[in-house]
Image (tube, coloured by chain):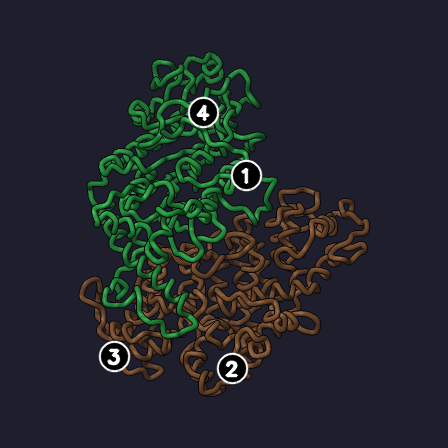
Chain colours: A green, B brown
Amino acid sequence: MHISRRDFFKETAGATSLLAFGSSIPAFLARSAAAMEGGQTSRETVLVVIQLSGGNDGLNTVVPYQDDAYHRSRPTLRISPDQALKLDSGLGLHPAMPAFRQLYQEGRLGIIQGVGYPRSSRDHDAAMEDWHTGVLRERVPPGARTGWLGRAIDTACDPGKTDLRGVFVGEIKAPFGLQTERVVVPSIKSLEEWLPAGTGWSDSTLPHESGTPTSAGGASLLAAVRNATANARLIQPRLAAANEALQTPKSAAYPPFPLAQNLAMVAQLIRADLGIRIYFVEMGGGGIGGFDTHANQAANHGALLRELAESTSAFVGDLGHDRLLESVLMMTFSEFGRTLTESGRRGTNHGAAAPMFMIGGRVKGGLWGAHPSLTDLEQDAPKFHTDFRRVYATVLERWFNLKSEKILSPGFSPLDGVLA
Amino acid sequence: MKPDPNDPAWAWAPFKPDAARPWDLRLAAHLYRRAAFGGTWPELQRALTEGPQATIDRLARPAPEAADFNRLYDDYENAAAASAGYGSQAWWLRRMIESPQPLQEQVTLFWHNHFGISNVHVKSNASLCRHTHVLRQHGLGVFEALLDAVLAQPAVWICLGAGANGKRSLWDSSVRILMDRYTLGPGRCSDSDVREGARALSGWIVSQGELRFVPGEYDAKSKKILGQEGDLDRKGLVRILAKHPATSQWLAQRLVRWFVSDTAKPSDSLLAPLARQLTGEGNIAKGVEMLLRSNLFFSTEAYRQKVRSPVELALGIIRPLEGRTGTVQLAADLARLGQELYEPPTIQGWAGGLAWLNPLTTLGRAKLAEALLAVSGAYGGKLDPAGVVRRHGGAAKDGGSQFLIDLYLQGDLTPETLGALEAGPSAAGAKGPGSADPRHIAARLASLPEFQLA
């Protein structure tokens, strides 16, 4: 039986999707079963969101090295034409990102330029909240807000079932973008935290799947909990294997950055095929460091971009080994870009529009949209031409086959030419 | 009268044990799970001797030492709330474990869930701490006083959007939450009621973390809300909403969902007698007491018909073992399992039921049981199931296995499960001593599917 990788979410549940397998078999098991019967199976699509906390300087990430205004405005921070890693159209990547240029040349990296939104905030918290909720502030009281990914997860999880669709992987508190109304989205710092050691839990002699409930009243709820327990027992060895793999030197293919370690775990979880569709990782938040480069930006920003590019590239290579890249899409975002003009402290201030990276096996590589003008600015920052919610709509519609107007407000059409 | 859970007369009549539904360990433990986060062996034995109604008397009436106990814990919580981290939540968890009146904590948690005020938005442990103190203080009293006291604090206004809103009155969408979620229930008021309600709340702002009234911003003109007209201000609006019949009906529904069943969809006519207890001369305590005493509460409609929340799971492990354990670690572990105190996901509260469970949280729950009962580690082995077995005369040679089953799960295991438990852990995967270790037995029992149900 062939299962399309796109039609998994409940929204589009049809003959070939989850519901066709009956109520109690999780999809990853159904797919394994199909594989054993010799059928063709393809992976469900997976999204990995990488948050760049602090406001990434888009102009020194995707550098307009032919633009005089750029060089004039950044006497010490400017990246000269011979330093920039050339792409197309007079743009180049920051010299710390050869790993990204490689992906670009392989056609696996797309750059959506000039992303932002109307009257965008330059306050970290407010701007990040806009990006996380996907609904601008004035519309919803704080207590009723949820994250755009959280809403996708709520939409994708049937209330009668106990599926796992989204996780945060990292040390900090899970970002608000994953905030659901209903479903629990776990945060994973380490897999040990989630793995019982023994004490009978993994004891296969305990009946778990069927069995006669002792209390007539509690029958259906108990059956559902037993089913959840059975699924948990089935994923436990996979998690344990993933954990083992993370401890072995083989994962040394990843550079020793925090982001790389988090992505190494994501790769293991994708490989374990647990049914998780949305992964969220982060760099720069929760304390010192981060992309908020008001002073002495050059060295700091370069290190961050190196971590981003090399970690992501290692992840791409890792997934590529198992031909998993086709089903994985990575997306970066930051709460805002930065100002064009370098400040007296050799840094940059909070800005507006910035580029987003889209990486994966089914990304249409290359530049999407024009680089924002550096002579037509808004308070010293590039203006946006593409609303970030159109990027979200692209992911929701074209990658997950969800109706985006149910998750964002209506009116944000997906972008053509971002996904192949 | 014939047992019929849909017949209000039967459902709300006080439960009297009979041959079909004898007062046994199962029902005594059911009562303690729902009203007290779980019972100790002496509590369950005493309940068996005294019968259901006398036991509910004891659970529902304020314990004489409760006032002193709560004053002390208020101070601890306030002190801890001055700093970041899980300090004050940890004190609340400890209060749940040790309170002489655990029903009050269950009801406080019910209201925390009902208002769904989250520190993600309020960003002040102290403010959340004060909010929960109000919920505790008025949670078993008159709803109008509770609502009034909640609205006299900044936390709820921040969550409803006043904080970001300067001097203007609340948004209509915020007032709709007040009406649809906190009081009348969904779909009971018109857009005009909402607009007029927003005018009644004009003048209130949150500034520097405090709620203030700015007379110049107050719209003093006459308003018409839910058919009542006049110069209605905040107090006036609170009075109209709290006394409206739809409110008691909605609260009755929320209480049934919380105390009786995740899955029941009680009809309006079934809810009506409970709703009446909550209004007029009645109050929340009377309603909760009526609920706990009822046939409905002890029926199969209720029995094991709730998925334990992470808090209920942890306390259901800890309380029966008469133990005390580190609650800062516990607060963090409960957050990972989806129930961070002070941070319900939205104003709708935690979804509860099966939403607690996915393969990872199910593993995490087993992991928590294991950690709480481990001889060392994050919880320092403070729970002592062997001591409990010894004190209450469980047979030593089965490691207290039968005793622990009675304490934790009563008669609610299938013969297959019992057989497997008796056979002991299989060699593979089991670490340390086998089935004779009460710690392992207790951890095993607490990770069974049956234990996940309250």
Looking at the rendered structure, the secondary structure element under dot 4 is strand
**Which amino acid does the dot numbered 1 rest on?**
Ser
Q: Which residue is mark 3?
A: B398
Q: Residue A328: x, y in percent?
A: 33, 37
Q: Which residue is mark 4?
A: A113
- Mark 4 or mark 2, which is nearer to you? 4
Tell me if mark 3 has few (under 14), some (14-19) or many (20+) residues whose alpha carbon lies within 10 angstroms of its own.
Answer: some
Tell me if mark 4 has few (under 14), some (14-19) or many (20+) residues whose alpha carbon lies within 10 angstroms of its own.
Answer: many
Find the distance from the CA under tag 4 to the CA under tag 3: 69 Å
Find the distance from the CA under tag 1 to the CA under tag 3: 61 Å
Q: Which residue is mark 2?
A: B55
- Mark 4 or mark 3, which is nearer to you? 4
Query: Which badge, 2 or 3, comes first in the chain's sequence?
Result: 2
**Which amino acid does the dot numbered 2 rest on?**
Thr
Q: Nearer the viewer, residue B293 or A29?
A: A29
Query: Do marks 1 and 3 share a chain?
Result: no
The residue lying at 61 percent from left, 40 percent from top is A138
Q: Which residue is mark 1?
A: A409
**Which amino acid does the dot numbered 3 rest on?**
Asp
* Residues under numbered marks 4 and 3 in contact, where contact means CB atoms less than 8 Å apart: no
